[in-house]
Amino acid sequence: MQADMEFKGCASLTNHKINVLKLKNLIGGLDMRVEAINHNIGRVYVVDKGGNSQPIPVNEEEKPIITMIDGAGRRVPPYNNEFLYIHGDSFVVSVNGTPIMRLEQQKQHSIVAQQQLQHEEIEL
């Protein structure tokens, strides 16, 4: 994690929560949202204060000022004014070349067991 970033929550592909990052003065009052489309694909997009999806903002050269790269450093092109991401990789979202958010892939499994079984954790 970069020094100027901190934990802001979990973007799950298996729940119905929408994570919102208030971009404040970064991009003319827009907010960024992260949400699941299905159990394998999520999306990152921007909305206005009314929650209406907005086009990815561009600079004077008509290049997007919001970019996303995958774990291999490849640029993820926007599709229909949103960035799609998949389970199994990590991503960095930048505004004007400055990273503002990381979507970090986590390796974990839920343990689901019979109710009568006790559970404990041992810290290693």
Image (cartoon, grey):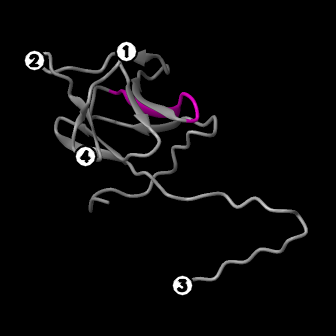
Please provide percent x and percent y for residue 25: 28, 34
User: Could you tell me which secondary element the residue under label 4 belongs to?
Assistant: loop
In the rendered structure, which disc, 3 or 1, sits on the residue that comes first in sequence? Answer: 1
Disc number for residue 72: 4
Which residue occupies the foreground of this view, 84 or 56? 84
Spatial CA span between label 3 and label 2: 53 Å
In the rendered structure, which disc, 4 or 1, sits on the residue that comes first in sequence? Answer: 4
Report which residue position mark 3 lands on.
Answer: 124
Q: Is residue 47 magenta?
A: no
Which residue occupies the foreground of this view, 22 or 95? 95
Residue range of the region highlighted in magenta in the rendering = 29-39
In the rendered structure, which disc, 1 or 2, sits on the residue that comes first in sequence? Answer: 2
Considering the image in quadrants, where does the C terminus appear? bottom right
Spatial CA span between label 4 and label 1: 23 Å
- Badges 4 and 1: C-beta atoms under 8 Å apart? no
In the rendered structure, which disc, 4 or 3, sits on the residue that comes first in sequence? Answer: 4
Q: Answer with the quarter of the image where residue 3 lies.
A: bottom left
Mark 4 vs mark 1, foreground winner is 4
Please provide percent x and percent y for residue 81: 35, 18
Position of 22 with respect to 1 (left or right) is right
Which three-letter amino acid code belongs to the residue tagged 4? Answer: Ala
Report which residue position mark 1 lands on.
Answer: 80
